[in-house]
Image (cartoon, rainbow, N blue to C red):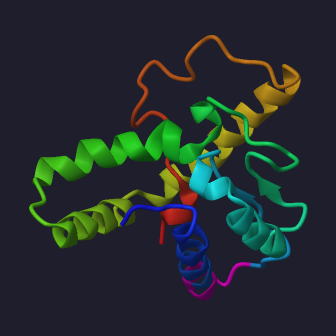
Amino acid sequence: MTVNTERDPQVMTKFWAALGRRRGINRAEQWFQQDGATPHTSNESLTWLRQRFPDRLISRRCDPEWAPHSPDLCPPDFYLWGYLKDNVYINNPQTISDLKAVITQKIRQIPREECVRVIGNFTRRLQVCLQRGGGTRSTSWSGNKRHKLETWWELHP
């Protein structure tokens, strides 16, 4: 399914409700961060998000605004996608169903300790960003882009 301006609020409603049921998340303390892709920043999508995350939404056309070209501030970008690419495709999934099953399996195999490390790593990245007044970082965070960096804690069961 392609996410477009019309589908984005529908996808978010389904994801948000399911995540809340599974995790018992305190919505009053939850922040939501997304990239600046057009479907995510349509009036409909932002209205939906602002109703659920007042003053706790990081996105294009919001305050605070999404930092463009900032994969080092987004745990899925700085670890998860590389981890999944390295570990999912070695199984050569043949169908969408197989692909979903392997992705789910690989995410569940990420050790909890690694998820804890990503929080610390992410916090350090944010501190550097604040110290530089939002400036850029010219050097890499790690000599080995993948697996040394931590993973996205939200997807760990």
**Residue appearing at x 45%, y 33% in the figure:** 148
Residue 150 shows in this picture: no
Task: Please state the horizontal and vertical placement of residue 33, each as a whole percent of the image.
Answer: 69, 54
**Residue appearing at x 57%, y 34% in the figure:** 71
Q: Relative to the observer, which residue lies in front, 59 or 99?
A: 59
Q: Is residue 8 above or below residue 111?
A: below
Q: Is residue 40 above or below residue 96?
A: above
Task: Please state the horizontal and vertical placement of residue 139, each as a whole percent of the image.
Answer: 60, 12
Task: Please state the horizontal and vertical placement of residue 14, each as a whole percent of the image.
Answer: 54, 81
Tally of numbered tags: 0
Q: Is residue 24 above or below residue 57?
A: below
Please provide the residue range marked out in magenta.
18-25
**Residue appearing at x 13%, y 66% in the figure:** 95
Q: Quadrant of the N terminus?
A: bottom left
Query: Extreme bottom residue here?
Result: 21
Q: Is 143 on the left-hand or right-hand side of 83?
A: right
